[in-house]
Amino acid sequence: MAACKLGCAAKYEVSITYRGGSQPLGVFEPEVVTWGRVQDDYSEARIDLPASCCGKLEQVRSWSHEVHIARDGEEVWCGPVAVDTNCRSGNVIIARDVLWWLQRRVIHDDHVSAAQGSVSIARDLIVDGFAPDDPNVLAYLDTAGTGVISDREYLANSKYVLDALKDLAKGGIDLTTVGRRIVVRPQGMSLGRTAILNCEHFQGDVCASDNGLQAATKAILKGDGVTGEAGGVDPYFGLVEVLQEDTTIKSAATAADQARAIVAAGNPPPLLVQPPDNSALSPEAPVCVSQLVPGVTVPVVLDCVCRSVAQDMRLSKLTVRWDATGEQVGVLLQPVMAEVSE
């Protein structure tokens, strides 16, 4: 693996295009940029531009236009405009990544799966959502592996596509975006591996948290006329029950598989590693921004906190802010579940 270093961005540029990435409207130098990447949901970007940038900004319309963010000349984020606010004091654009389109696309056809892998189900739903009007996303759809074999039913006009994908993410898939690329993998499959991070690679504070809010020693999953259970009383943690409902699940076996996934993620309670607010990775951290994709494995060795950590973690969220004072890159790391190879 080539050596990486996070560095500190010297310049951010924002370009605005018509949806699909065509017909450039203009390139702008922002005052403040925030962006990120997140697992199993859409991410959001905020662009603060000076009032002097007005000009072509008056042509920007939500859904019709896209924002493209470049960090030192390399595009790191893109997605449709959600809100464009023009004030006498300046301009603010809020955009969301390409998954946001699927939060406003209903399921158009019936999808009744029998013994189908969750990754394949997700792919079918994404294709369904973009089929009537594809803003140049399907060509970049990136799926691999099989995922949990399940029996599910998604009927036309029953819900938004992204909500259905979030159902699958509870126990079958991991989902994220990188630019135009929607990445779908079986839950637990690593997207790669970075170099080791230690205390010196964090600026300011860093915390290791035993997060009991996500604990589960037993899970009950209620489907459509079926119920699946997994786990029970743990000899150390006792009984911590989680009850979820997903009416798209039609078989007891699928419900039981999802219940097992909930317990696997919550017993023991997950140990989170993250810098608190106003803290970030050091520019000397041996990782590239291109590597910081939710799903990548990050080995962590922390001996500067009371609860020492020396284990593989999984990146689940990236948050970046840049302004005249510099750049802050924050990460949220969670324990690695059992590795998946297919």
Image (cartoon, rainbow, N blue to C red):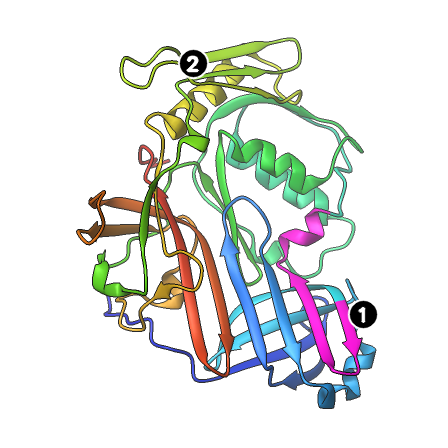
Left or right of 162: which side holds 178? Answer: left
Q: Quadrant of residue 6?
A: bottom left
Q: Residue at label 1?
A: 61
* Residue 119 locus on image (x, y percent): 51, 36
Q: What is the secondary structure assignment of the residue under circle 2?
A: strand
* Residue 138 locus on image (x, y percent): 63, 54
Q: Dot 2 surroundings within 10 Å: few (below 14), some, or many (20 or more)?
A: many
Number of numbered discs overlaid on the protein picture: 2
Spatial CA distance of label 1 from label 2 is: 48 Å
* Amino acid type, label 2: Ala
Q: What is the secondary structure assignment of the residue under circle 1?
A: loop
Q: Dot 1 surroundings within 10 Å: few (below 14), some, or many (20 or more)?
A: some
Q: Residue at 60%, 38% (x, y): give it.
A: 165
Q: Which residues are magenta?
A: 84-103
Q: Residue at label 2?
A: 230
* Residue 200 locus on image (x, y percent): 22, 64
Residue 31 magenta-highlighted: no
Left or right of 13: which side holds 19? Answer: right
Q: Residue at 37%, 56% (x, y): give it.
A: 275
Left or right of 278: which side holds 30? Answer: right
Q: Quadrant of residue 18?
A: bottom right
